[in-house]
């Protein structure tokens, strides 16, 4: 696990510095414990992968799927199975389009409702 962490540390840091518009929008809702006082981390290294947002307390990952995910559905499925099986995590997915098409108040309500399912 240490090897993977060292290998992924710089890419994870770089991803935090160059967030997409969708990631910035969701991060504005998750940072500073704004949702039920849960702490989320962004671009968290878990095993062999970097996940968009992670809450240890809920054992929950939030992924923002851009257009590339339409072309790599099988890889995403394998990644998701790995994270579920190795770390016993649950995953919420939102598309870039969904995030960009909705205002911040609606997104906050939607994310809150989706997270409440796991509480």
Image: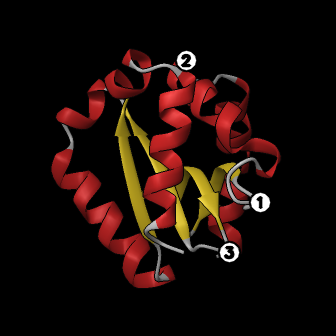
- Closest to the observer: 112 or 47? 112
Q: Residues within 10 Å of mark 2 (few under 14, many from 20)?
A: few
Indicate which disc, 3 or 2, sits on the residue closer to the N terminus. 2
Q: Cβ–Cβ below 8 Å for labels 3 and 1?
A: no
Q: Which residue is mark 2?
A: 21
| Location of the N terminus (image quadrant) | bottom right
Q: Position of residue 58 (x, y in %)?
A: 60, 73
Q: Which dot marks residue 57?
A: 3
Q: Which residue is mark 1?
A: 37
Indicate which disc, 2 or 1, sits on the residue closer to the N terminus. 2
Q: Residues within 10 Å of mark 3 (few under 14, many from 20)?
A: few
Q: Cβ–Cβ below 8 Å for labels 2 and 1?
A: no
Q: Position of residue 101 (x, y in %)?
A: 37, 16
- Dot 2: element: helix
Q: Is residue 48 visible?
A: no
Q: Position of residue 74 (x, y in %)?
A: 16, 53
Distance from disc 3 to disc 1, alpha carbons, whole Å, reads 10 Å
Distance from disc 2 to disc 1, alpha carbons, whole Å, reads 24 Å
- Closest to the observer: 49 or 57? 57
- Closest to the observer: 56 or 81? 56
Q: Is residue 102 left or right of residue 74?
A: right
């Amino acid at each position: 696990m240490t090897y993977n962490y060292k290998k992924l540390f710089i890419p994870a840091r770089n991803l935090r510095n160059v967030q997409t518009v969708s990631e910035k929008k969701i991060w504005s809702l998750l940072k500073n414990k704004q949702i039920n006082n849960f702490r989320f981390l962004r671009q968290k290294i878990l095993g062999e992968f970097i996940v968009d947002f992670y809450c240890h307390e809920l054992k929950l990952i939030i992924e923002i799927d851009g257009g590339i995910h339409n072309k790599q559905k099988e890889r995403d499925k394998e990644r998701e199975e790995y994270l579920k099986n190795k770390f016993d995590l649950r995953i919420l997915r939102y598309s870039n389009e969904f995030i960009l098409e909705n205002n911040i108040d609606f997104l906050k309500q939607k994310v809150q409702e989706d997270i409440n399912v796991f509480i």
